[in-house]
Amino acid sequence: MSTDELVLTTVAAANGGSCIARHDGRVVFVRYALPGETVRARLVGDRGAYWNADTVEVLESAAERIDSLCPIAGVDGSGCCDLAFAEPSAVRRIKGAVVANQLARLGNYRWCDESEATAEPVGDGGATGWRTRVRLDTSADGRAGFHRYHSAELVHRLDCAQLPAGLLDGLADTQWPAGSVVHVVVDDDGNRHVAHTGKGQRTAVVEGGYEAVQRVAGRTWRVPVTAFWQAHRDAPALYSALVAQWAQLEAGMTAWDLYGGAGVFAAALARGVGDTGAVTTVDTSRGASRAARAALADLGNVSVVTDSVRRALTGQRTRADVAVLDPPRTGAGREVVDLLAAAEVPRIIHIGCEAASFARDVGLYLGHGYAVEELRVFDSFPLTHHVECVAVLTR
């Protein structure tokens, strides 16, 4: 065994897809391992207080380990499906335990015991073929690919298990402008859309159209292929129904949809407040705002604002009965949470796609006197360590 390799026994899952092990008193975060395994791991990073390592051989495997469900993922492959080697139900338990740990450590909130926590499946719970949108980068020779983990190097095999069959057919052999980004979408009509963008260049559509048709709760959106839409095919309907249920709106109320994207949640909130109520949806993306204005044009009770959430809240003069937040992976943060608390919003539905930032934001709400009324965790990104968390906070 070389000097940069160690034999380690993992203890528990950590946020970010690694497992925790210890060597001579130092914490080692080991990727491509499961809790309770003994592995031979190659050191790939020294952060002083801790090391990072990749599993290169499993010496004693956990019962939940399976042959990888993704043919291109792994320590020497793409970074796409970093938990593809674990039985899907075990992955959901790992994700639940990680969220519970992060909530306790960073949010000072006990959701449940880590041994009992689990993420819920989305749709039929299938681990493969669930993604409807994907973004590929290109190398200097114009070939599309997926990044290796935390690397600029690309893997040019495109058969990632997250993708439905045929989504990327023919794209591996296409010569793209070097350094461009390739966007591929299959929409709710089953049509494929392919476009590429480059620095300082306009979006060029090479198949289908610039906008993809998406449907939620009987309403149709036309969303740019470059704009945000939930990756899991069943996530928009699930989250929309949950927001409608948890908002507990009545006719004449006011609701805010913050980081609202194309306005899926705004549509659900508009049904709750009725013609006498008001909904304001806010997002920085001009493309998303255009999609929202078009899809919600018949709803006179919805206002679409293209601005940052911070500026929109700073200038807001109407008190909301409910606020829904779906921030990016970095979370809402202290300033936005402070503004919501100062606005005395009594009911907040907060959605987070990164466990640590979600837990931190929950802790910020608790510091303002909010209490967690509901909290659910979803396995919205099977085969990966990523997770979606939704909480209702009231005061």
Image (cartoon, grey):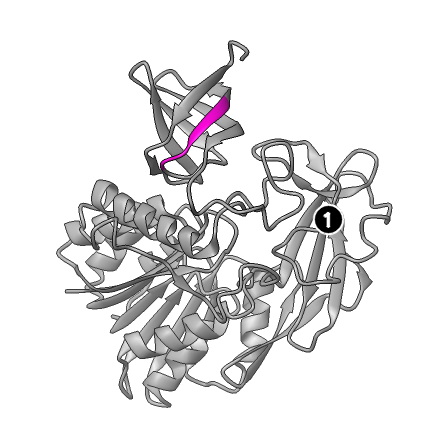
Task: Report the span colored magenta.
Answer: 36-41
Residue 40 within the segment the image draws in magenta:
yes
Question: In the image, what residue occupies the spot 50% across and 57% down?
Answer: 284
For residue 351, say whether it is visible. yes
Residue 76 within the segment the image draws in magenta:
no
Query: Residue 332 versus residue 252: which sits nearer the camera?
Result: 332
Task: Give how far across and how far down residue 154 sits, in percent.
Answer: 70, 36
Q: Check the image and report above or below for 125 versus 301.
A: above
Question: In the image, what residue occupies the spot 34% across and 44% down?
Answer: 356
Q: Check the image and report above or below for 149 versus 133.
A: above
Q: Quadrant of the C terminus?
A: bottom left
Q: Is residue 213 left or right of residue 345?
A: right
Query: Residue 261 versus residue 8: which sits nearer the camera?
Result: 8
Q: Is residue 388 left or right of residue 165?
A: left
Q: Check the image and report above or below for 239 versus 227.
A: below
Task: Give how far across and how far down residue 202 sits, in percent.
Answer: 75, 53
Task: Give how far across and how far down residue 1 sits, in percent.
Answer: 53, 13
Q: Residues within 10 Å of mark 1 (few under 14, many from 20)?
A: many
Magenta span: predominant SS is strand
For residue 353, say whether it is visible. no
Residue at label 1?
158
Q: Is residue 173 left or right of residue 339?
A: right
Q: Quadrant of residue 294?
A: bottom right
Q: Residue furthest top?
A: 3
Looking at the rendered structure, the kind of residue marked 1 is: Leu
Task: Give how far across and how far down residue 200 sits, in percent.
Answer: 73, 44
Secondary structure category for the residue under label 1: loop
